[in-house]
Image (cartoon, rainbow, N blue to C red):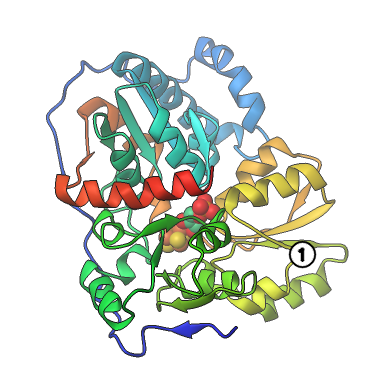
């Protein structure tokens, strides 16, 4: 079944600004200023350094360790947890993340978290998803400008126009969209469950927005006709099939595993395709001698910390949005209670339905 594009009839929308996040006044007293790397602190933090020593240098640790300690103290004081996406840098991912994972795993954690405050170490749409699933919690994003090229590729008006152009065709939205876009859609999906969600609808055709490459990938796995939008991830779309062939020729025995946001020639050239969590599982289970993760660069560091026997060949494409999140900003988020993510209640009720449908269908 051929994949069709919806965007030919509809103009690609202008990028949206990230939703409003209001700075808030300080609500807790500062803990011990996170500055000094004393011998006592070095000893106290040694077990944690052991976990990251393959990917964090001793010089970097001098800077990170006091901040990690201060953040972990503040978390306890504020009854907060940190949800860390797989693309966070290792000092965040391993140092302060309470729950780590891909978009689906983090959304599930957000739904059952008991702490009063959630700090999203990820991008804005992920924080919105947490707010949708935990509306009574305070959800903070350390940098409100941490957006996503996929989320900014489509607006609610675009979705309404698609609905009018394809009456009766269900709209599946990738989780990488704003809450306002999700509110216009029937069900959400992530890269872990997109095929399952599309097939769960029991219809011959669906719109799958906004990632054209995820749509193409899903089309190779299902007989359901997929109608795609024109969005793309600015990190994954830069990889090419030619690069994959060059790396294979240069690195005999190399295993290539790719995220489904990559273009089709990259996916064709890879040994495995899956969500960030599925990629990590693949490496941990198969233990290849040499592997290239065709995705955001920090993920290889996070897996390398736990799989020192595997050699990682790194094509270093960084996500500029994910990289806005730092230990300093996480510390300040907890200290000053900023930047709180809110979703308009009417939008939230509709968007939550789309996300909850996904969680039910993927259970
Ligand atoms: P995952 O759901 O696979 O973690 O992907 C999220 C993302 O933003 C990938 O670029
Ligand atoms: Fe968005 Fe791509 Fe960054 Fe993921 S890696 S947050 S899809 S821009």
The residue lying furthest to the bottom in this view is: 8
Q: Is residue 240 left or right of residue 136?
A: right
- Viewport quadrant of the N terminus: bottom right
- Viewport quadrant of the C terminus: top right
On the rendering, which quadrant does ligand 2 occupy?
Answer: bottom left
Which residue is located at x 82 percent, y 62 percent?
254
Q: Return the x and y of residue 77 as percentages of the image width and height.
A: 31, 14
Which residue is located at x 78 percent, y 50 percent?
311
Secondary element at tag 1: loop
Front-lying residue, 341 or 174: 174
Position of residue 74 relative to residue 205, above or below, is above
Task: Specify the quadrant of the image occupied by residue 174.
Answer: bottom left
Front-lying residue, 355 or 202: 202
Which residue is located at x 55 percent, y 32 percent?
94
Q: Is residue 38 left or right of residue 70?
A: right
Q: From where the camera sits, is residue 9 visible?
A: yes
Q: Return the x and y of residue 167 as percentages of the image width and height.
A: 31, 78
Q: Is residue 197 left or right of residue 184?
A: right
Residue that mark 1 sits on: 271
Position of residue 231 relative to residue 338, above or below, is below
Circle 1: is it few (<14), some (14-19), or many (20+) Cα within 10 Å?
Answer: few
Q: Return the x and y of residue 116 as percentages of the image width and height.
A: 29, 22
Front-lying residue, 323 or 17: 17
Q: Return the x and y of residue 50 as percentages of the image width and height.
A: 66, 25
Which residue is located at x 30 percent, y 26 percent?
117
Position of residue 82 relative to residue 325, above or below, is above
């Amino acid at each position: 079944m051929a994949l069709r594009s919806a965007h030919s009839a509809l103009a690609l929308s202008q990028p949206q600004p990230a939703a409003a996040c209001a700075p808030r006044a300080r609500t807790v007293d500062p803990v011990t200023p996170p500055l000094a790397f004393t011998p006592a602190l070095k000893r106290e933090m040694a077990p944690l350094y052991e976990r990251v020593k393959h990917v964090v240098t001793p010089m970097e640790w001098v800077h990170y360790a006091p901040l990690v300690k201060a953040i972990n103290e503040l978390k306890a004081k504020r009854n907060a947890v940190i949800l860390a996406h797989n693309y966070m840098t290792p000092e965040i991912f391993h140092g302060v993340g309470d729950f780590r994972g891909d978009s689906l795993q983090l959304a599930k954690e957000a739904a059952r978290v008991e702490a009063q405050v959630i700090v999203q170490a990820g991008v804005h749409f992920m924080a919105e998803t947490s707010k949708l699933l935990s509306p009574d919690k305070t959800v903070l994003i350390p940098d409100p400008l941490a957006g996503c090229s996929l989320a900014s590729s489509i607006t609610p008006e675009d979705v309404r126009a698609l609905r009018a152009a394809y009456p009766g065709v269900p709209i599946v939205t990738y989780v990488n969209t704003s809450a306002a876009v999700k509110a216009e859609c029937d069900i959400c999906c992530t890269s872990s469950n997109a095929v399952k969600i599309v097939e769960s609808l029991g219809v011959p055709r669906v719109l799958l927005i906004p990632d054209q490459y995820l749509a193409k990938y899903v089309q190779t796995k299902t007989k359901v006709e997929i109608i795609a939008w024109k969005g793309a991830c600015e990190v994954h779309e830069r990889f090419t099939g030619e690069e994959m062939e060059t790396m294979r020729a240069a690195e005999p025995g190399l295993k290539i595993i790719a995220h489904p946001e990559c273009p089709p020639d990259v996916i064709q050239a890879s040994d495995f395709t899956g969500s960030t969590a599925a990629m990590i599982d693949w490496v941990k289970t198969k233990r290849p001698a040499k592997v290239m993760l065709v995705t955001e660069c920090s993920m290889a560091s996070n897996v390398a910390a736990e799989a020192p026997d595997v050699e990682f060949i790194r094509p270093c494409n960084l996500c500029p949005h994910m990289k806005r999140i730092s230990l300093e900003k996480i510390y300040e988020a907890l200290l000053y209670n900023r930047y709180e993510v809110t979703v308009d209640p009417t939008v939230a009720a509709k968007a939550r339905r789309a996300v909850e449908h996904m969680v039910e269908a993927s259970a």
